[in-house]
Image (cartoon, rainbow, N blue to C red):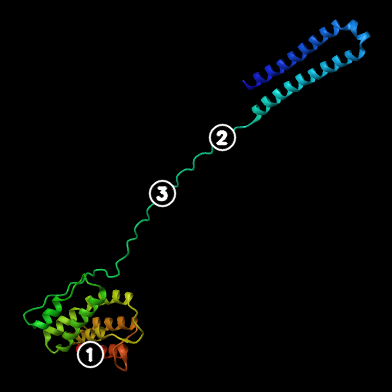
Amino acid sequence: MKYIVIILLVLLGVYLYRRTQKVAQNELDEKTSAQQEKPQETTVSEDVIDVEAEVVEETAEKAVDEVVVGANTVVPEPEPEPEPEPEPEPEPEVVKEKENEETDVNLPATGAWAGDVFANLVSSFDASADVTAQHQTLLNIIGHSYKLRKQADYCQYGAQLADNYLAVYAKYQQQNKVAADEKGPGFMQLSTMLNDTKQFDKAIMLCEQALQYQLSDGTVTGFEGRIKRIEKAKSKAAG
């Protein structure tokens, strides 16, 4: 459509130009006879014709230029609206590992021989409590059994707690910094009761575990000397 308009304007300019020339030529023919008598007037008429022709040409050229400029003018496309920023995905909730996991520790039941204090100690043990609390409760039960180890029932009951204590202490040691040569009363008391109930191999194994944890039994010779004494008792019992 733009190019058609341009062509029409060009044709219009040419038409106007030729029409002006034709009119000028007619006027020129009519005044031919007068040119010889009045040469100056003829010159003026020719100048007028040339000026009119130039004006027509300039008008046509301007019209064409305006159309061409309009055709070449690029209308800027509207900028696309910015896309909305995606909503941040919710961060997955991090499930913290429980520091205090429940242990599979079931203490053996006490009998009629147990005093009220001891029975209350045993019943106070909670396998769902934190490992530190479990460890302390077991130490109290083992310590009470150790004090009354001359009574067979208490000594036997205390010796039965060896496996439970090892399971709880393994987790306790992971969560708590245990210094080297720290006393291990639980290991010492349990090994004594195991030795008294003739469970020599288990008593030795318990002492070896204490050595791996770099614990001390509070004596000069430590758990190494305790192992030697248990081995002697084992040999004597085998007789």
Give the label, 1 or 2, closer to the camera: 2
**Among the 4 quarters of the image, the one containing residue 110:** bottom left
Q: Position of residue 139 (x, y in %)?
A: 22, 82
Tag 1 near tag 3, CB within 8 Å:
no
Tag 3 near tag 2, CB within 8 Å:
no
Mark 1 or mark 3: name the one nearer the start of the chain: 3
The residue under the point 64% across, 31% down is 73
The residue under the point 27% across, 77% down is 169
Residue beneath disc 1 = 233
Query: What's the residue type where badge 2 is placed?
Result: Glu
Query: What's the residue type where badge 1 is placed?
Result: Ala
**Between 54 and 196, the one nearer to me in the picture:** 54
Horizontally, is 212 left or right of 114 in the view?
right
**Between 72 and 110, the one nearer to me in the picture:** 72
How crowded pointer 2 is (Cα within 10 Å; few <14, some 14-19, many 20+) is rated as few
Residue beneath disc 2 = 77
Tag 1 near tag 2, CB within 8 Å:
no
**Between 39 and 173, the one nearer to me in the picture:** 39
Measure the alpha-carbon separation of dots 3 and 2: 29 Å
Q: Position of residue 239 (x, y in %)?
A: 20, 90
- What is the number of the mark on residue 87? 3
Query: What's the residue type where badge 3 is placed?
Result: Glu
Mark 1 or mark 2: name the one nearer the start of the chain: 2
The residue under the point 24% across, 83% down is 186
**Between 46 and 185, the one nearer to me in the picture:** 46
Horizontally, is 170 left or right of 19 in the view?
left
How crowded pointer 3 is (Cα within 10 Å; few <14, some 14-19, many 20+) is rated as few
Residue 226 at least partly seen: yes
